[in-house]
Amino acid sequence: MKSSNETLILDFSNSRIAFSHLSDSELKKVSWLFYTMNKQWLVDIGAKVGMKAIKMNLPFVEGIIKSTIFDQFCGGTTLLNSEPTIALLANYGVHTVLDYGAEGKDEEQAFNKTMNENRRAIDFSSTNDNVSIISTKISGLAPNSLLKKVQIRKGITWDDLKAYRILLKRIDSICHRASEKGISVFIDAEETWIQDTIDHLVNLMMARYNKSKVVVYNTFQMYRKDSLQKIVDSYNLAKEKGYLLGAKLVRGAYMEKERERAKEQSYPSPIHVTKDATDDAYNMGIRFCLDNLDVISCSASTHNAESNLLMAKLIDEKGIDKLDSRIHFCQLFGMSDAITFNLANAGYRVGKYVPYGAVAEVIPYLIRRAEENSSIKGDMSREYAMVMKEIKRRKLD
Ligand SMILES: Cc1cc2nc3c(=O)[nH]c(=O)nc-3n(C[C@H](O)[C@H](O)[C@H](O)COP(=O)(O)OP(=O)(O)OC[C@H]3O[C@@H](n4cnc5c(N)ncnc54)[C@H](O)[C@@H]3O)c2cc1C
């Protein structure tokens, strides 16, 4: 019998495999979209005008957003109409991590809605073989001001304590449901000024639900100078308390915000000074996780080719089955198809974060994706260059 480790060449420059899920016309549409997003000034205008138009409830704007950037980066407006996206990915060996994409509302009603949506996504996943993980954000379940106050342990009132207990119930109800239904939960990492609160809650959940398998994953942002130590400390805590550690490794999404705040408030920036230092920390984190799979299950959630290759190389060198449930690669839907589909084609366990939700609610997420794909210096974005390579290969130019 063939082992799943028998060599299939992993080549992230293979644009044919990267885009074989797209027809010629779909590919052309994607190239137009990335070309447009590549222009920083267009993204800046689009973000401002789009936000205003959505707030003014202009229906044609929603239609335009839906058929362009929304379709590129989101699975659907609801769980049910995300099914074709989930099925398409599954056809190419890629599973889905469901991500309820609504952001930015700081009110009780929205927090309960997020909790209920997450629970619904878990139930949905338990009936769909191609989804075994959902993701959630603690800031979607409680006010930011509360998370901040709990972190600094100052000025906490009885009402805050009550609100904190409600938050604990919300996150527990999500993790409990996931545990019952055999689904895992990725809990996203956020800004440093609320992350200690998040870590505390996630550690509680891991101690409760990660006894025999990993249900709950914390996220480690490797752009933070203290992240490697945080992984080691989390590993030691899990060992000491007798549970398994779920570790999703990312580089980190809030670099500018973190640096600005540190400057404004005159404390040392928590972020590595250089990209190289972040990259080194990321790759060391991957090595540490793969050296400790007796306790750790790990997701390399990154679009960085070198880090993905390193993880794949270590899996092969260590003779770990490529489909071992303790290892996982993940990219965002609509980005880095070259990495996702080439990993899947070579037999690795890889997924896409697939956000879903009403168009108006996922706008902040869409703006972040557009900004990430724009280019200040005027050079071609990574995504656009790859799409153009395939356009040329198919002779569509
Ligand atoms: C599946 C998935 C889940 C994610 N979940 C989260 C999450 O929960 N929380 C979160 O914060 N982010 C999350 N992200 C986003 C992630 O943190 C990165 O912003 C994004 O993926 C880009 O980093 P990269 O590893 O893909 O690759 P790269 O493009 O190689 O790295 C870019 C990243 O490097 C870092 N960087 C860039 N320049 C410098 C510099 N000068 N000095 C120091 N560091 C620098 C920044 O973090 C930047 O985002 C997620 C990403 C994916 C793919």
Image (spheres, rainbow, N blue to C red):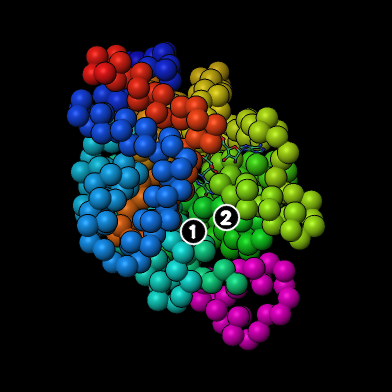
| 178 over 245 or under it: above or below | below
Of 1 and 59, the residue lying toward us: 59
Q: Magenta-highlighted stretch: main secondary structure?
A: helix
Of 19 and 161, the residue lying toward us: 19
| 57 over 396 or under it: above or below | below
Q: Amino acid at mark 1?
A: Lys
Of 379 and 259, the residue lying toward us: 379
> Magenta stretch?
146-170
Instruction: Measure the C-alpha gap from mark 1 to mark 2.
Output: 8 Å
Other residues around mark 1 within 10 Å, as few (<14) / some (14–19) / many (≥20): many
Along the horizontal axis of the image, is 397 left or right of 323?
A: left
Q: Ligand 1 within 8 A of label 2's CB?
A: yes
Q: Residue at x 43, y 35 (%)?
A: 38
- The answer to whether mark 1 and mark 2 are in CB contact below 8 A is yes
Where residue 20 appears, x then y in whole percent?
A: 26, 24
Q: Which mark is residue 137?
A: 1
Q: Residue at x 37, y 37 (%)?
A: 36
